[in-house]
Amino acid sequence: MRFSEFLNTGNELESVIVNTLQNLRGDADEQGQTAEISFDALTQIIKNTGYPTFNYNLFKSIYDQGTALKNVVDDFDQEKIILKTEKQAEKDPAMNRDNIGSTDTVKKMAKSAMNRRR
């Protein structure tokens, strides 16, 4: 086998991983939920598709080298992979600020407390 054939296998593996994770993400988006998968479960799925040497280090190197996986994965470690979903994006809304001026109120309260001490 030539070295270039191993490179193509890496691209195929990346494609299989991305497609698998996109399917999970699509299901989660349809149900309005966040999505995560254990790394062991993903390993078993990938091994069932014909890639017996799949492991965390290989996943990490594919993630670091390409952009396709970064578009699907929000965070990962050796235990689980958290996917980017619509629900995940909504979880961190912009900060809601009130019109009262909270910092001014705190300053007034502190000044009032200091005046009572005198």
Image: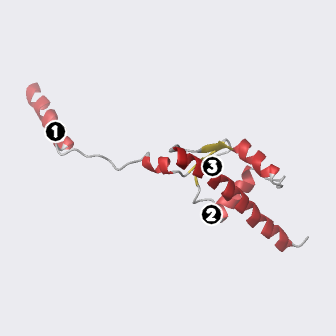
| Disc 3/disc 1 C-alpha distance (Å) | 47 Å
- Look at the image and tell me in which quarter the C terminus lies: top left
Labels 3 and 1 touching (C-beta < 8 A): no
Amino acid bearing label 3? Leu
Q: Quadrant of residue 35?
A: top right
Q: Is residue 110 above or below residue 77?
A: above
Under mark 2, the amino acid is: Ala
Task: Identify the residue shown where x is 83% and y is 53%.
Answer: 53
Q: Which mark is residue 8?
A: none
Which amino acid lies under the numbered mark 1 shown in the image of this protein?
Thr
> Up-down: is 98 above or below 118?
below
Give the side of residue 40 with respect to residue 32, left or right.
right
Label 1 and label 2: CA atoms lie apart by 48 Å
Element carrying mark 1: helix
Residue 75 visible at all: no
Disc 1: which residue:
105
The residue at which mark 3 appears reads as 24
Nearer to the camera, 17 or 97: 17
Q: Which residue is mark 2?
A: 68
* Residue 82 percent across, percent down from the top left: 59, 47
- Identify the element where label 2 is drawn: loop
Which numbered disc, 1 or 2, marks the residue that appears first in the sequence? 2
Question: Measuring 29% from the left and 46% from the top, which residue is drawn there?
Answer: 96
Residue drawn at point x = 46 percent, y = 51 percent:
89
